[in-house]
Amino acid sequence: MRKIYMAGMSHKVAEIAVREKFYIPMDVKTEALGHSPFDELLILATCNRTEVYVASDRDIAEAELVQYVCKLAGQRFEDFAKFFYFKTGDDVAHHVMNVSAGLDSVAVGEDQILHQIGRAYETAHNLHATGNSLNKLFQGAIHTTKRIKTETNLSKLSCNIPFLAMKQVQRTFDDLENRSVYIVGLGEMGSLMLKYVQEYTTNIFASSRTFANAEKFADVLTPVKLEDRYKVLGKCDVVVLCSICQEPLITKDEFEKVTELVGEPAEPAEVTDRRKRLIIDLGSPRNAVASIGEIPGVQYVCVDDLEKIVSENRRLRMVELEAAQKILKEGLDEFLQWYRMDEVSKDIRVHADRMVATANEESEKLLRSMPDLPENERERIRMMYERFAKKMANDYLYKVKAGNSPEDVKVFLKCLEASDE
C-alpha cells in the first residue's frame, strides 16, 4: 500500500514572523510539482499554514520531508525544524479533513480554506503530481466539506479572515460611514474584504499589483496605482493589506511622513478619534513592517492578532460544530475504508492471478497427455480452465472483499495462504 505523509506549520505552532518565511511563490511550487522526488506531491500554502503532502511507495522519514519543505522556502532546516509537525497514515487523513472543513482554522468553519485547498489540489493534479492516493484523499476532503456547508449552518456562523478583519474595524470605529478605507491587494481575500467594507462606507480606495485589476472595481471604489499608495495612506482611516509581496509595501519612515502625526504626543489618551489609523495586515509575508504600530495614533493588527476576537462566535457554533464533526467522521471513515481496502485489493489480485496461473498449469498438464488433440480443441480447454479459475476467484475472493471489513478479508487471505502450504 502506498503510504501517505505530511509535514507543515500553522498558526497553532508558529507566529507569523516564522510563517511568512515559508511563503512559497507559485513559480517555485510549479517547479516542485513538475519535478517531484516523491510518487505523489501536493503543496498547500496560505497565510496561516504551509503544508506538504506526499504519497510514496517507500518509507519517508520526518527529517527528509521537513528538509524538503525548508529547501522549497530557502530556509535552514536547523533553524526551523522545531516549528514543524509531521503526520503519517490515518493521522494525515484526519488532518486534511479538519483543515478542509475549516475546523483547524483561526476562525472555525471559515470558507476560504476550502477554496485554497481546491486550488492547491487542482494545481497538483493538472501537473500530474498527484496519484490515486492523494486524489482520493483530497477529493474526499473537498466533498465532505461541501456536505458540511450544505447540511449544517456552520459556515453561516463562521467567520473567515476578512470577516474577522471587519470585526476589528468595527471595534475600532463605531461609525464607518464618514471614514475612508484603503484596500491594497484585490485577490480573493481583498475582494471579500471589499464586499464587507461596501456595507458600511462608499469612501473606498484600492490598489492592485496590476492597476487594470483595480480599475475593474471602479464603480464602487477609487482605483490607485500601487506606486501612488503613500498619497492615499495618509488620508485613510483604515488600511487593509492583502497583497502578495516579498518585501514590505509600507515602511515606518515613509508611512510616518504621510500620517500627519510626526512630532505629536504619543500618549494613547491624547490620541483623538479623528487621528486614529487602523492598519490591518492580512499578508503573509506581511505587507507592512510591524513597527508602524509604534507611530502615535496608529494601531497595527496582523493575522495572529485577529485570533483574539474569535471567541465571540464560538458559543453559537458549538451545536453546528457537533453536526459538522459527525459528517467529517463519515467522510474520514469512507476514505480510511478505501485506503485500507486498497491494500487488500492488491493482495486479492495476487491470489486471483495465482489461481489463474495454477489453472493454466493444470490445463497444460492435461494437454500434454493428449498430443493428437486439434489446436482449436486445445484452446477451448485452456479457456475453460481459465474461466473456471476466474469464476472461483470472483466467488471466493472479490465477493468476500465486497461483504467484509479489510481486517476480515486479511484473515481470510491468510487462511488461503496456509491451505496452500
Image: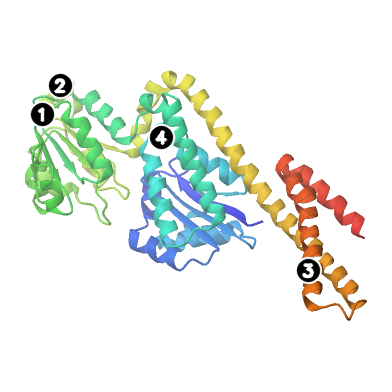
Which numbered mark, 1 or 3, is in the foreground of this view? Answer: 3
Q: Would you say 38 lies left or right of 394 here?
A: left
Mark 1–mark 3 CB contact (< 8 Å): no
Type of residue at label 1?
Answer: Arg
Type of residue at label 2?
Answer: Asp
Which numbered mark, 3 or 2, is in the foreground of this view? Answer: 3
Q: Which mark is residue 179?
A: 1
Answer few, some or many: residues within 10 Å of disc 4's Cα (few below 14, many 20 plus, some between 14 and 19): many
Q: CA distance from mark 4 to mark 1?
A: 28 Å
**Quick one: SS at disc 1?**
loop
**Quick one: SS at disc 3?**
helix
Quadrant (top left, top right, bottom left, bottom right) of the N terminus: bottom right
Q: CA distance from mark 1 to mark 2?
A: 8 Å
Residue 54 image offset from top left, x and y in percent: 54, 56
Answer few, some or many: residues within 10 Å of disc 2's Cα (few below 14, many 20 plus, some between 14 and 19): few
Quadrant (top left, top right, bottom left, bottom right) of the C terminus: bottom right
Q: CA distance from mark 3 to mark 2?
A: 88 Å
Q: Nearer the viewer, residue 83 or 328?
A: 328
Residue 407 image offset from top left, x and y in percent: 76, 43
User: Where, by quadrant of the figure, is residue 388 drawn?
Assistant: bottom right
Q: Earlier in the sequence, mark 2 or mark 4?
A: 4
User: Where, by quadrant of the figure, is residue 237 drawn?
Assistant: top left
Residue identified by numbered label 4: 106
Mark 1–mark 2 CB contact (< 8 Å): yes
Residue identified by numbered label 2: 175
Tally the numbered discs: 4
